Amino acid sequence: MKTFKVFLLLIFISINLTAQNNPLSGKVVNSESKTPIEGVNIIIKGASLGTASDKSGHFFFPSLPDGNYEFLFSAVGYHAEELRLNHNRNTVIEIELKPSPIKLGEVKVVSTKQNLIAQNVPLPVEVVSKENIEAKNAQSLSEILNSEPGLFIAKDGVWGTHISIRGMSRQNIVALIDENRIETATNIAAGLSMIDLSDVERIEIIKGGVSSLYGSGATGGIINIVSKQAHYSENFYLSGNIGSGYNSVNKASASNVNLFTGGNRWYLKISGAVRKASDAKTPDGLLPNSRYKDNSVSFSGGINPYLNHEIKINYNRFYGEDIGIPGGKPFPAAAVSRYPQEKRELISTEYKIPGVSNTLRNFSIKYFHQFILRDVEIIPSAVATTNTGADHKTDGLLLQTDWLITNKYRIIAGIDAWQRKYEGSRSVINKTLNRITVDSPVPNSKYTSFGIFIQNEVFAMQDNLIVNLGGRYDLINIKNDEALNPNYIISNGVRNDNPPRDMQSSFAAGNRDNSSWSANLGLIYSLFPGFSTTLNLSQSFRSPTLEERFQYINLGGDVFLGNPDLKPEKGNSFDLGVRYLQSKVSFQANAFINYFTDLVADKVEIQDSLYLKSNIGKARLYGFELSSEFNFYADNVAYLSAAYVKGEDTGNNENLAEIPPFNGRLGVRIPLLSLINVDFSASWYANQENNAKGESRTGGYTLYDLYLSTKKFDLNLASMQVFAGVENISDKAYRNHLSTYRGAIKLEPGRNLFIKAIFSF
């Protein structure tokens, strides 16, 4: 505590509130057409400070301390540009960006806890832009990510999905919304389903162990969903968009609205969306119980109350009801399962002081609270019903400082603390026996994490070498109440608080501590302009979740039990990459190998009956991924990607479960008459025969997709853009390997025709 107080004192001593502050504004235009560019990210290197250009290409910093700055201008479809500037008055600048039909790593990334563009991040990173999201009419975030190399979708249904990164999924991936953790159950979690895609600016994915950035759980990587934001402006403005779309495969309709407004000291965004879908069609008929209905609303705003100080507030609410779960483990195959209601609320507030001094370039403190309600109803037969309800509450606090020691040496340091609280129960109703049994699928419990982190960035060899070195130390405490299953039984209206207990599924009250350190070393070396190599070494860890320690799942099918004595997982990751980024061709490839000790998995105690969470000893995952784009004529682009991963339980000489097959994608993007952009691709998946015990083999298949998008049509006071497409053109019958546990459901949804329109003003 004494060290913490001294740390804060040094920060506030550095704050120079009397420093001269002046506004800075400018405009970004296309270097060829001289037309304004909307959505250009303008970031200040060495500080967590940035803005974006509006429809007229203008951008605005309301209060920026005088001094020397390095600005970075980046946007999808353009070459990034840097500008060094001495700001000491009301500065107005204009910059031109050169168009590029291929991706050159020009997209902004904040998941490294600083503002960078992807090509300057040594970590293996993928960024899915707003333009990519708009081009499809995806029903979940995972569907969008599935086309990126090294990422693979897994499904608990059509609505409930999650993602695998290089063979690691769910509990080994930290998911965030605007860098706020999404913490919920790991079984049938659907955490990535409670996202309004129309309110997403971009999605950032870091592949590999990054616990040194985000603490426990990031052994496989992180997914950060960045929401759309309004911005400051010299003059009052009001803009927005209205969208609507339809999918034929499940008669899914969706509508959304986004409004943006602001002035020179404030900004505000308001968004809302509604969706509804019926059961999905497969080549063999309907996929029963795959319907869903949900809605969302969000707002965010910022105010610049004094000099360069800023207060930001963000709120979003997502609500779903009557959401079908097609079935499969841990449910009985014939059971009818659904979410009667799912709810997620997130509120965060942040106080930032950019440009505190010439050395302390940014000070920020952020608090967030997230509430997730999960209800599950299971009807295994006409005489029985199981209802499970749980509240997941997460509170977090992040204090971060950004230091510019010299133009070649930067430091980010801070404190990251969060706590997740679980409260829930389950009731099993037997109509024949007129009996209600109440138990605890997980005891009421708390998971508390406190971490201190530091990241260094050094530029050397005339900026041809960038070195990132970081470390983190975490203390984790897990507390749980006693859970004697069943808790009580009501038989013929009479409650019995002392029924016979199943001690195998009961848990004594406990208090456990874990501590761990993690570290990373990342290098980017530019051999010559446009060509660089990357190297990443990291040590990561994961303290098992509440569900893994204490779960008791018995829904009439297989029984899954937790283990309070689980040890934390530890991982060592090695990643070697090459990048070639030129105006006509881009190529990126990475090879990786990850070693794990004490990996947590479901150990078979009784085949097809009883599974116990266990540390399986040692494991290894290795593979590669690559992606390339080639601008072969005019603005026509061909693209290719491929990914392979192999997972091995080296302690028992067995394959790891839920490892995606070798897969890839080949496609072409062609503009027609400057009116319509055509994107045609073939995605292929090899046989997966490296299966774990009890896991099904899946055959290979190829899917063909066609996406069309028009240019923006000017309607005087508004503009309109139309998107359409056909997914799985051949109506291919196939099985997704990571969804093979879904009981009697064998096939994925078939051919889908969609259309979507977005009106902007």
Image (cartoon, rainbow, N blue to C red):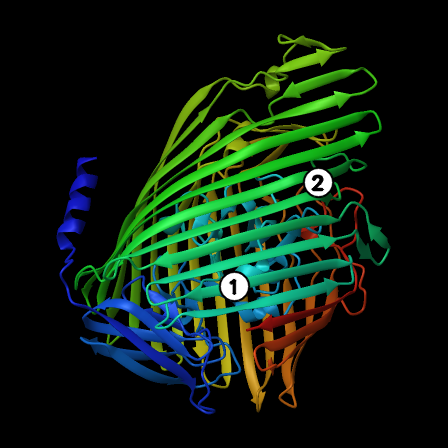
Q: Is residue 341 above or below residue 438?
A: below
Image coordinates for residue 741, horizontal then vertical, percent = 71, 44
x 74%, y 53%: residue: 277
Q: Which amino acid is tagged 2? A: Gly
The residue closer to the viewer here, 229 or 146, is: 229
Q: Which label is found at residue 91? A: none
Residue 688, located in which quarter of the rendered image?
bottom right
Q: Rate crowding at label 2 as few (under 14), some (14 to 19) or many (20 or more) other CA atoms within 10 Å.
A: few
In the picture of the structure, the residue carrying the numbered disc 1 is 259
Q: Secondary structure at mark 2?
A: loop
Circle nearer the N terminus (2, 1): 1
Q: Which percent across, then down, holds residue 427? A: 68, 23
- Left or right, 633 with reference to 30: right
Identified at 47% across, 91% down, the residue is 33
Residue picked out by circle 2: 694
Mark yes or no: residue 649 visible: no
Total number of numbered labels?
Answer: 2
**Few, some or many residues within 10 Å of mark 1 (<14, 14–19, 20+):** some
Location of residue 603 (image quadrant): top right
What x and y, as percent, mark residue 59? 37, 74
> Residue reaching furthest right?
284
Q: Is residue 122 left or right of residue 372?
A: left
The quadrant of the picture occupied by the N terminus is top left
Left or right, residue 116 beside residue 175: left
Question: Which amino acid type corresponds to the residue marked 1 in the rendered image?
Answer: Leu
